[in-house]
Image (cartoon, rainbow, N blue to C red):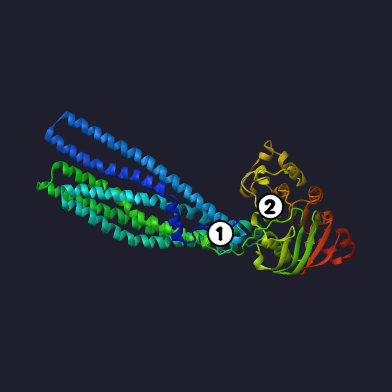
Amino acid sequence: MTTPDGPRTGAGILRSALRRNARAMAGGTVLMGMYQAGETAFPIALGLIVDHALRDRSLGALGLSFAALAAIITTVSFSWRFGMRVLQKANTTEAHRWRVRVAACGLQPVAGDLDLKSGEVLAIATEDADQTADIIEVVPLLVSSLVAVLVAAVALGTASAGLGLLVIVGTVGILSVLSVLSRRIGSRTREQQARVARAGAKVADLIAGLRPLHGFGGNRAALRSYRGVSGEARDQAIAVARANGAYAGTAVALNLLLATAVTLLAGRLAFRGQITTGELVMAVGLAQFVMEPLKLFSEMPKYVMVARASAERMALVLAAPPVAVPGSDRPAADGGLEVDRVQYGSLRKLEFHVPAGRLVAVTAYGQRSVADLVAVLAGDAPPSAFDGAVRVGGRETAHLEVGALREHLLVNPSHAEIFAGTLRSNIDPSGTARLVSEAVEASLLTDVVALHREGLDRAVRDRGANLSGGQRQRLSLARALAADAPVLVLHDPTTAVDAVTEQLIARNIAALRRGRTTLLITSSPALLDAADQVLVLDDGVITREGTHRDLLATDDTYRQAVAR
């Protein structure tokens, strides 16, 4: 897996979206142009009907006029329906493409060197992707609105050159005023999106750390911090809403002023006999109709600025330089796990080897060392961030293709995420695992499955909200075991279960993983006793090794650290 290629600037993202959807936009522009032309033709047709009715007074001409109006109405109805269907389909598809690209960059550790938190990346992958894709609808609507204004200007110009010139000059003046306001909206929108994303990131951090915050009484301070961030986002949102309100109010006022001017001028010309009654009807109808395309036309600069602001935020993720370049090698199928003189954080040239097919445990006297070791093994610390090497299947992880590394090495953190879905979809997300039932039994998740008639199809809420802490941990362990990875690293998989359950789980892990390379990072006596070998990590290096029982008998420090 590599970092997705493609445009990495806001302007490049917008150009790419327009090029990729050129055909859909062309079709949508034609259909929406027909819609606007039909809308414009309606008051023109009414004016012609009035003139012919007054002059000819023929029932046949009247019937033909009604048929023409029916044809216009049918054209308006179907062109709008199918035009918007084409554009909205293209819009939705394009937004999905950008969501996938941003998510791919955010999920790949090789492309994770961002000054953005996960909540901000999520906001960019959703809201900003949607607003960027809106450019696909904006351009056709802009063109079709322009068509409507030009048709109205030409039609009025045929009746009176002054009327046509008034529409053109008024349109140019309206757009000039609104373009200045749209720039202000664009700058404020960029700031609002950034503040909302920061608030979202703060929420994600608080949810992840809610339990420890309650533990040491930090929830009130965290709440004050979030109130400050969310208050800034609220204030900026209010400022954007005010700017949008001023923009919309100015647009309506200017459009109304132009329509009033056209109507008054047409009435004056008709009073003087310079235009016919039918032309007066046409002018009044067009003056009322032209407000809608003018309103739409005048709003387009605002949407363009918002799309550009969102595209520039997406570019922050897409253009982030990779912290590591993935290799193309694949690890040996039967290889073990080796940490070779790794120096990172509190780790001081750490060395140890987990032979293929063995169950080895690492217990640490300091939690900082555990966190640093898990970060190195999980790829949270890229190879360029530490000295030394980590080898899987005899190959350095820095030289391995990302997909191959993830297939071969699975690191299950102590607080793995639980997703909304079912027990089955959490244990086997891909639907291809062969050891689902064995993993359920090994993790002692059988009681959770048996408690409900749905069994493995029991619904699970987001973050496992309808499960206890122990059930969530066992569900996470079942998922790790079901993956049957050649090399499995488990970090504190039983901290939320009772001692008896922990003892049974330890035996089950040893039995299920027999012949597979497994590393346990834990201080649990039951898990340490199940391991073939225990390594003691103290002050960043391995200081002792042996079986759990030998270390209990010979090392007082070890006994005091792990005995419960």
Residue 183 in view here: yes
The residue that appears at 48% across and 54% down in the rendered structure is 129
Separation of residues labelled 1 and 2 (CA atoms): 30 Å
As drawn, the residue found furthest toward the top would be 59
Rendering coords of residue 209 (x, y %): 63, 58
Residue that carries the numbered disc 2 in the rendered image: 407
Out of 349 and 247, give the one closest to the viewer: 349
Rendering coords of residue 533 (x, y %): 84, 59
| Side of 526 where 140 appears, left or right | left
Rendering coords of residue 194 (x, y %): 49, 61
Out of 117 and 220, give the one closest to the viewer: 117
Q: Which mark is residue 201?
A: 1
Say which amino acid is labelled 1.
Ala
Height in image: 267 above or below 204? above
Out of 175 and 64, give the one closest to the viewer: 64
Label 2, secondary structure: give it: helix
Quadrant placement of the C terminus: bottom right
